[in-house]
DNA sequence: TTGAAAGCGCTAACAT
DNA sequence: ATGTTAGCGCTTTCAA
């Protein structure tokens, strides 16, 4: 029987329990100022009618929706997926639903989604802006609205009080990796990363240079290949790089796509890893861990990023909008595997 | 200046435009029965006040939220992430937001989330139940509620009218892969897949057996290793499998985790691919494509799954709840690469 | 075509 | 401790 499930309202419950709607509301929510008898009767009536409160109506009154928005360029990107997943887990534990939207790095879409979130009155927003320049625009949009937590991006200091953010210490990570390669004897090292438009890229480049500087080494061999987007880095680019006369003896490559391009290029050129070429992955993906030989990688916990971001947001939602820890800086570790060795003595 | 952005209501717009709220509503929504003058004045007033309608209030009246829920075991699983991403893209184009939730294969959580979706009055649900047995339970929950589209799962035929679903032809895919290996001369083939609790696993097993049957070959060598979950398949399991006396000469392995375990085991045992062991990946992940040697893989379009599911749901939401194409069956292709060859003649 | 008014289901302030 | 009531901001009859 496809019987239409009766959408029992709070009034039905009140009638069945023989009390007023106010009492039902109190009994079901606060539990404050409710006699045992009423509590029992209301619970029984609600159970009997299969009553489920209507969040919409409640939201209209309380001005809170119990939903937070999450805005990233692409949830299918492994570097975001785990963040989203971890954040959702923490938020759900707090009874909140998560709305996700992909911006595909389109600033217009980004603003449109923030506006949509606002219109839907979402309680808060987790966002990784597609470019740091776009911040100003959507910051205005978000201002006066729900609390915002930034995911691993730099944002303009808003009058000395920075937005809450969860940051990853890419600079220190890149420095550690570079230092390690220099220690092995490498002098011509290539850093393959998406452009410096966003914080992670900028920080990595800074760390990369810092390692050269602190070793007092001529940074002429510090090769930085910027990619507009990780999607653009084809095998061909890596091939060209590795076929240069004085080719890099080591490569630091981001993520899955770029790393994949580099590894394929090395294979095509019959460069043995690590004998002919040392490789460090930025981001510890399945690919890095399973490749033969296994790729030494910079690792940070995506779960921690998501969890910390959710935590920061929850804190803000709990009313502690003033103080409390407002930024988190997460560490990056170098996971040593089999893809690095001293450069070939020529 | 952190000036509080005035939350202009429809009444403010009405006052500013010098018309009634009803007229504003009509002017902004239907456009029906609205004089040019009123339309102009209302538009001007709305613009001036930066009016943004409150979806919550509207939802309370119209009983539609403009949001759909998406329920999968884990958005961070590459096999789901792209589905979610593609579905979100299609839904957003239709002006809908997507709420995601991870069930982590917990039936209780699954039911709880469906209830939450219902309570929130989401317009529709995209769901990949964690187990086919659980269907009944949440089907009841969902009944009388919003339209549901199933993602690659079998569901009990509800009185002859099946739930709308997007299915992938895993059976034919597995059969093609197995047939290919048999054609190369393999007789002892292992299929590594999560258990038969869900449709994909069941279908693959059926296709696997079908290939043996149609070749009229003793299926004694058809080894099926069921895993509770892809998470559980450690390298150790694969090692044990490959160290048996009459070990399989070919392996068909699912996804990233299981495939990774198999590849590592092969590496540890110094088994060369494809000389000593042929490997086929189920699901064309980055790992399969970039591995050396590149892994022959069964591929289906995750984007198509997500897009088709969204399309099916939109169709239902547009009121065509009665007829129309209610199920889609998507093809699986075998992408030939370098990981398969004839078995070693012993 | 337009305005007035009645709710959607709930919470919270107020009165008892 | 409990009942009554006034909205939250919007859509949508129903009159005019």
Image (tube, coloured by chain):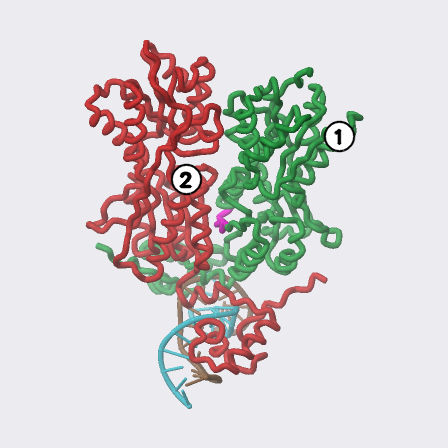
Chain colours: A red, B green, C cyan, D brown
Specify whether residue B81 is in view.
Answer: yes
Furthest toward the right, the residue is: B216
Tell me if residue B96 is in the magenta stretch. yes
Describe residue D15's horizontal placement relative to residue B328 as left or right.
left
Closer to the eye: label 2 or 1: 1
Pinpoint the chain carrying mark 1: B
Residue B220 shows which numbered tag?
A: 1
The image shows residue A333 at horizontal and vertical percentages of 35, 36
Pinpoint the chain carrying mark 2: A
For label 2, the crowd category at 10 Å Cα-Cα, with few meaning under 14, some 14 to 19 and many 20 or more, is some
Marks 2 and 1: same chain? no
**Start-end of magenta stretch:** B94-100
Q: How many marks?
A: 2
What residue lies at 30% left-to-right and 56% top-to-bottom?
A144
The image shows residue B310 at horizontal and vertical percentages of 57, 44
Q: Quadrant of the N terminus of chain A?
A: bottom right
What residue lies at 47% left-to-right and 61% top-to-bottom?
B58
Q: Toward the viewer: A35 or B45?
A: A35
Tell me if residue B60 is in the magenta stretch. no
Which residue is identified by label 2? A73
The image shows residue A280 at horizontal and vertical percentages of 38, 27
Say which element carries label 2: loop
The image shows residue D7 at horizontal and vertical percentages of 40, 72
Furthest toward the front, the residue is: B245
What residue lies at 53% left-to-right and 20% top-to-bottom?
B293
Say which element carries label 1: helix
Q: Are marks 2 and 1 in contact (CB under 8 Å)?
A: no
What residue lies at 44% left-to-right and 18% top-to-bottom?
A265
Question: To which quarter of the image does residue B305 belong?
Answer: top right
Q: CA distance from mark 2 to mark 1?
A: 49 Å
Q: Quadrant of the C terminus of chain A?
A: top left
Q: Toward the viewer: A138 or A73?
A: A73
């Amino acid at each position: 029987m496809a019987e239409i499930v009766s959408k029992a309202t709070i009034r039905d419950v009140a009638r069945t329990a023989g009390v007023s709607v106010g009492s039902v509301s109190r009994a079901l929510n606060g539990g404050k100022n409710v006699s045992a008898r009423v509590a029992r009767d209301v619970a029984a009536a609600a159970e009997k009618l299969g009553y489920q409160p209507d969040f919409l109506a409640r939201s209209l009154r309380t001005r809170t929706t119990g939903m937070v928005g999450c805005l990233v360029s692409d949830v299918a990107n492994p570097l975001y997926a785990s963040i989203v997943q971890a954040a959702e887990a923490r938020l759900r534990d707090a009874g909140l639903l998560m709305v996700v939207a992909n911006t595909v790095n389109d600033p217009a879409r980004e603003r449109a989604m923030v506006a949509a979130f606002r219109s839907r009155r979402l309680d808060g927003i987790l966002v990784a802006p597609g470019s740091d320049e776009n911040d100003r625009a959507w910051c205005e949009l978000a201002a006066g609205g729900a609390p915002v937590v930034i995911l691993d991006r730099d944002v303009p200091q808003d009058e000395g009080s920075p937005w809450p953010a969860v940051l990853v210490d890419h600079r220190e990570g890149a420095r550690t990796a570079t230092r390690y390669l220099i220690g092995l004897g490498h002098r011509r090292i290539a850093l393959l990363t998406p452009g410096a438009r966003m914080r992670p890229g900028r920080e990595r480049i800074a760390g990369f240079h810092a390692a050269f500087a602190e070793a007092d080494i001529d940074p002429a061999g510090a090769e930085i290949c910027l990619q507009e987007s990780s999607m653009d880095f084809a095998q061909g680019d890596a091939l060209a790089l590795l076929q240069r006369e004085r080719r890099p003896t080591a490569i630091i490559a981001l993520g899955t796509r770029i790393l994949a391009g580099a590894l394929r290029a090395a294979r095509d050129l019959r460069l043995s890893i690590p004998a002919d070429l040392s490789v460090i992955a930025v981001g510890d993906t399945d690919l890095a861990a399973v490749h033969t030989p296994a790729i030494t990688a910079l690792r940070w916990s995506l779960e921690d990023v998501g969890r910390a971001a959710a935590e920061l947001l929850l804190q803000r939602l709990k009313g502690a909008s003033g103080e409390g820890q407002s930024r988190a800086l997460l560490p990056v570790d170098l996971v040593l595997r089999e893809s690095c060795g001293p450069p070939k003595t020529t």
